[in-house]
């Protein structure tokens, strides 16, 4: 009986050891994948320096337009988060966006900047199309 108990204990210990080795291997794999992902993220962190050269009001109009169109996080983000993102990305401080948005609402043409962007894009696309035809 002692030999059987010893063999069972040995099998049990071997089984536990194999399980530990499998977990170590899985952890090493996860760490390797995480390291590769972090390297990829680090290499993409070097963004070109872009400065917003239109008015702050125009940027706020764009931010509210993107917010209304629910283009970030499937529409599950706030004006504040979008504003902070653009402030950080473009190095501009927008201040009280809700107050400026109230001013936009009072304008005769409340989406003047977005209309300007749309018109410029249509002209750009027409030029490309014309060049492709010639």
Image (cartoon, rainbow, N blue to C red):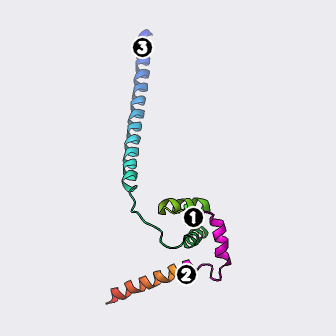
Q: Name the residue under label 2.
A: 115
Give the number of the disc on residue 94. Answer: 1
Dot in front, 2 or 3 = 2
Of residues 13 and 109, the one nearer the viewer is 109
| Residue range (magenta) | 94-113
Which residue: 44% across, 85% down? Answer: 123
**In contact (CB < 8 Å): disc 2 and disc 3:** no
Disc 3 designates what residue? 6
Indicate which disc residue 24 carries. none
Q: Disc 3 or disc 1, which is closer to the eye? A: 1
x 42%, y 26%: residue: 15
In this rendered view, identify the residue nearer to me: 20 or 94: 94
Rendered location of residue 69, percent (x, y) = 58, 70
**C-alpha separation, residue under disc 2 versus residue under disc 1:** 21 Å
Q: Are marks 3 and 1 in contact (CB under 8 Å)?
A: no
- Quadrant assignment for the N terminus: top left
Q: Is most of the magenta stretch helix, strand or loop?
A: helix
Q: Which of marks 2 and 1 is nearer the N terminus?
A: 1
**How dense is the environment of label 2, judged by Cα within 10 Å: few (below 14), some, or many (20 and up)?**
few
Label 2 residue SS: helix
Residue count near mark 3 (Cα–Cα under 10 Å), binned few <14, some 14–19, many ≥20: few
């Amino acid at each position: 009986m002692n030999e059987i108990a010893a063999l069972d204990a040995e099998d049990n210990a071997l089984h536990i050891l194999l399980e530990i080795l499998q977990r170590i291997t899985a952890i090493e794999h996860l760490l390797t994948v995480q390291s590769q992902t972090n390297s990829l993220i680090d290499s993409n962190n070097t963004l070109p320096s872009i400065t917003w050269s239109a008015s702050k009001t125009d940027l706020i109009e764009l931010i509210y337009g993107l917010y209304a169109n629910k283009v970030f996080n499937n529409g599950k983000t706030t004006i504040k988060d979008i504003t902070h993102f653009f402030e950080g990305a473009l190095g501009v401080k927008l201040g009280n966006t809700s107050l400026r948005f109230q001013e936009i609402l009072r304008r005769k043409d409340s989406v003047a900047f977005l209309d300007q962007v749309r018109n410029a894009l249509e002209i750009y696309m027409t030029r490309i199309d014309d060049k492709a035809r010639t």
